[in-house]
Amino acid sequence: MTWQLRVAHRTGYRYATPATQSYNEARLTPRSDRRQTTVVNRVETTPATRAYRYTDYWGTVVTSFDLHAPHTEFTVLATSVVETADEGEPVRSATWKDLRSDTVVDHRTEYLTPTPYTPRDPELTKVARELRKGLDPAEAVLAVCEWVNQQLKYQPGTTGVHSTATDAWRAREGVCQDFAHVTLVMLRAIGVPARYVSGYLHTKPEAKLGETVEGESHAWVDVWTGGWWAYDPTNAIPVGPRHVWVAYGRDYADVPPLKGIFTGGGQSTLDVSVQLTRLT
């Protein structure tokens, strides 16, 4: 099954006093990859800025822009049309022996190593090792994702953008970022290379063509068991046509939709909206 989706991601900033300078990076351009093709993408700002694009280390298209005039409001609008498809069946060719080989460990080491967001956690490691018993690597991935989905409660506001996997596990709740981070800790603990994916999810499977739904940024995991394939632990579903893939990395720190600095401005407020429309 294939879908064509339009994504409109708007981020607005308001400053208590005029900001005099602003420097930003936006990772808001969907990838063209194994199950997805970006037909068109545009990143615009108000006020208008000087901008240029480059591809970062992880293969993500980054739009960088700066503003050197006083402003009390700043808006970034990313609009894309993307063709998506089913992920397909998990790749099961790798054995546990294969995953322990020097070649795999060397080539995938960045996706096996703990990070500040995905630190080693003895309790999660113990559970992961128990879950993998008697299973091949692909089966173990699904078992871990299902377990995380059952153990964590989806609860916005409990954790923040800087919360680690351990923070979310102790709280036993969080949002999609936390579900992905906890899953990564467990998969890496048993030797499965796994990376963090950021993107969007169309929340209405039966939406009519042309119907727009309100959404938000989403996150899931991409794993290697002889080949890369993805799974959404927050919803315990395979990644499919409703998922729009934007960026991947070791954890959230490699893929933030927007990051930057400004001078002046005092306190700031942030407003984010995401709208997805199924076109075909």
Image (spheres, rainbow, N blue to C red):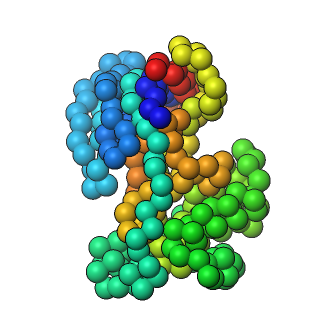
Apparent side of residue 104 relative to residue 241 in the rendered image (left or right): left
276 shown above or below 85: above
Q: Position of residue 210 (x, y in %)?
A: 53, 14
The reply to whether residue 236 is in sight is: yes
177 shown above or below 16: below
Say which residue appears at 51% left-offset and 73% top-offset: 137
Q: Position of residue 142 (x, y in %)?
A: 60, 63
Say which residue appears at 48% left-offset and 78% top-offset: 191
269 shown above or below 145: above
Apparent side of residue 185 relative to residue 38 in the rendered image (left or right): right
The reply to whether residue 199 is in sight is: no
Q: Position of residue 158 (x, y in %)?
A: 74, 51
Apparent side of residue 14 relative to residue 77 in the rendered image (left or right): right
Q: Position of residue 190 (x, y in %)?
A: 53, 79
Of 2 and 121, the residue lying toward us: 2
How many discs appear?
A: 0
Say which residue appears at 46% left-offset and 82% top-offset: 96
Of 164 and 14, the residue lying toward us: 164
Q: Quadrant of residue 257?
A: top left
Say which residue appears at 39% left-offset and 29% top-offset: 82
